[in-house]
Structure formats: structure tokens, C-alpha cells
């Protein structure tokens, strides 16, 4: 079985999450940023306990997705929903990431968004993030939400970020328009530590367990 991690993002439904407990999924993402998949702290608090019911290996880690949150906002949500990982999709600095990690005892994933021209939105030097972040995720830029566009980016643009992540012992994940039909190609191209999918396992905006299962099987091997 492949060791590549699978992150299913944008969960909102108890029933859908329960239908996934038999699949080898490593991360479950809950979106707190502005999005059609946005959940509240109270909603996430209902969903997170279900991760302890997983029957396929160890329980997935819970990931909260935020864009430029404040510390009080994070404190309020974490008081309701005990997340394992905070994924930051905005222009958060290394100092802010460090503050979050120290204040809440969580792991930090920093997401960078790749624009159509191959440049990184709000790009800043990666120097300073080493020893602070635990994961680096590249996604396709969406001008409305920052990420979650459902479109792929120029995968070759990711190579220097993957190299940086490998050099600093940081998990490297790729997202953006992935689905069961193209994830094999991405894995061959980038050899990431993990892949992140949301709209690619949905039908009419709702998570589709058949698509989730097919995606996981493509990544992990049957």
C-alpha cells in the first residue's frame, strides 16, 4: 500500500463522515474560512469525535482550514472543536504561525496558492518557516476564497517548494483540482508526501462516498 497521505477536505455531514470510516484516510479537513463548505466551531465539534470511530488503521487527524485568522478567532473555535492541525491559507507570517503553534499546541500546515501565471499569491520567502510549520501545501489560487477552486495548477511550479520541504523535514502536500482521474499523474510528477482533495470527490457539491473510495484506492492502492 502506498505511504502517500490522503486528506479529504470540506466535510460538513455526520452521515458522510460515518460512511468513510472504513477507508485509509490520514487527514479530515474542516473549512472555517469563507467557503461554500464552511462550518462553524459547533458543527466541527459534532464531527471530530467521529474520527475516533475509524476502523481503517489509525484515526485521521483533524485539520481546520483558515485564511488570515486572528488569535482570538482561533481560540474561540478551538475551545469548541479540538483540532489537531491548523492549516493557514492566507498571508500568515512565520511569527504568526509560531504564535499559533505555541498558544494552542497544534501542528501547522502552511498553504501557498499558485496563480494561473505560475506565480504564488502573497508569496514570501520560506526562510523563517523552517522549524515552525509541519506541512507545506500547494493549492490553486482562487480570487474569491484563496483556495478550493477545483482547478489544477502548473505542477512543475511546485518543485522548489517540495525540495525546501524535504530539506527541512516538512510534509509536502499537493491540492487543486485533483480527482481519481488525474491523481496518478500528479503523484508521478511530484511524488508528494500527501494529496488533498475536496470538490474532486463531490457530486453536485456533496461528498460522494463512491468518488471518495475510488480516489483513496488510486492513491493508496487497493
Image (spheres, grey):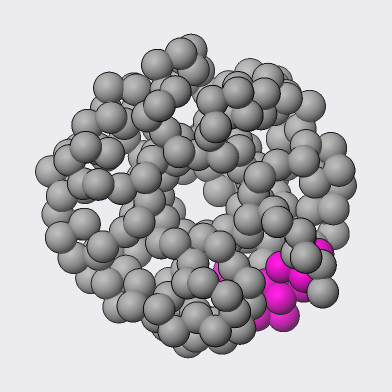
User: Magenta part mainly helix, strand or loop?
Assistant: helix
Q: Is residue 209 magenta?
A: yes
Q: Is residue 137 magenta?
A: no
- Can residue 79 be seen in this snapshot? yes
Q: Quadrant of residue 155?
A: top right
> Which is more toward the observer, 145 or 12?
12
Q: How many marks?
A: 0
Q: In the shown orientation, is residue 95 left or right of residue 50?
A: left
Instruction: Give the vertical position of 118 relative to 144 (above or below).
Output: above
Find residue 73 and report its horizontal and vertical position in percent: 18, 46
Q: In the shown orientation, is residue 148 left or right of residue 102?
A: right
Instruction: Give the vertical position of 26 relative to 95 (above or below).
Output: below
> Which is more toward the observer, 125 or 132?
132
Residue found 77% across the figure and 41% down from its top: 191
**Magenta highlight range:** 205-219
Find residue 127 and report its horizontal and vertical position in percent: 46, 13
Q: Quadrant of residue 82?
A: bottom left
Q: What quarter of the picture does the N terminus occupy? A: bottom right
Residue found 47% across the figure and 72% down from its top: 59
Instruction: Give the vertical position of 84 relative to 53 (above or below).
Output: above
Find residue 129 and report its horizontal and vertical position in percent: 42, 23
Residue found 13% across the figure and 43% down from its top: 72
> Which is more toward the observer, 196 or 198?
196
Q: In the shown orientation, is residue 54 left or right of residue 65?
A: right
> Which is more toward the observer, 175 or 220?
220
Find residue 64 and report its horizontal and vertical position in percent: 37, 54
Q: What quarter of the picture does the C terminus occupy? A: bottom right
Residue found 80% across the figure and 46% down from its top: 187
Amino acid at each position: 500500500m502506498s505511504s502517500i497521505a490522503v486528506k479529504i477536505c470540506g466535510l460538513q455531514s455526520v452521515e458522510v463522515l460515518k460512511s468513510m470510516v472504513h477507508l485509509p484516510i490520514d487527514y479530515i479537513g474542516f473549512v472555517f474560512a469563507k467557503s461554500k463548505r464552511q462550518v462553524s466551531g459547533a458543527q466541527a465539534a459534532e464531527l471530530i469525535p467521529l474520527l475516533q470511530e475509524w476502523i481503517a488503521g489509525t484515526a485521521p487527524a483533524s485539520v481546520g482550514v483558515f485564511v488570515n485568522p486572528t488569535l482570538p478567532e482561533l481560540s474561540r473555535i478551538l475551545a469548541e472543536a479540538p483540532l489537531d492541525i491548523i492549516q493557514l491559507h492566507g498571508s500568515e507570517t512565520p511569527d504568526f504561525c509560531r504564535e499559533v503553534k505555541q498558544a494552542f499546541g497544534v501542528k501547522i500546515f502552511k498553504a501557498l496558492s499558485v496563480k494561473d501565471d505560475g506565480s504564488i499569491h502573497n508569496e514570501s520567502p520560506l526562510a523563517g518557516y523552517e522549524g515552525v510549520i509541519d506541512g507545506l501545501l500547494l493549492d490553486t489560487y482562487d480570487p474569491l476564497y484563496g483556495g478550493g477552486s477545483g482547478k489544477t495548477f502548473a505542477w512543475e511550479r511546485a518543485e522548489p517548494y517540495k525540495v525546501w520541504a524535504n530539506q527541512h523535514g516538512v510534509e509536502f502536500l499537493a491540492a487543486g483540482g485533483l480527482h481519481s482521474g488525474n491523481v496518478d499523474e500528479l503523484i508521478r510528477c511530484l511524488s508528494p508526501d500527501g494529496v488533498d482533495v475536496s470538490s474532486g470527490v463531490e457530486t453536485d457539491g456533496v461528498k460522494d462516498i463512491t468518488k471518495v473510495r475510488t480516489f483513496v484506492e488510486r492513491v493508496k492502492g487497493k
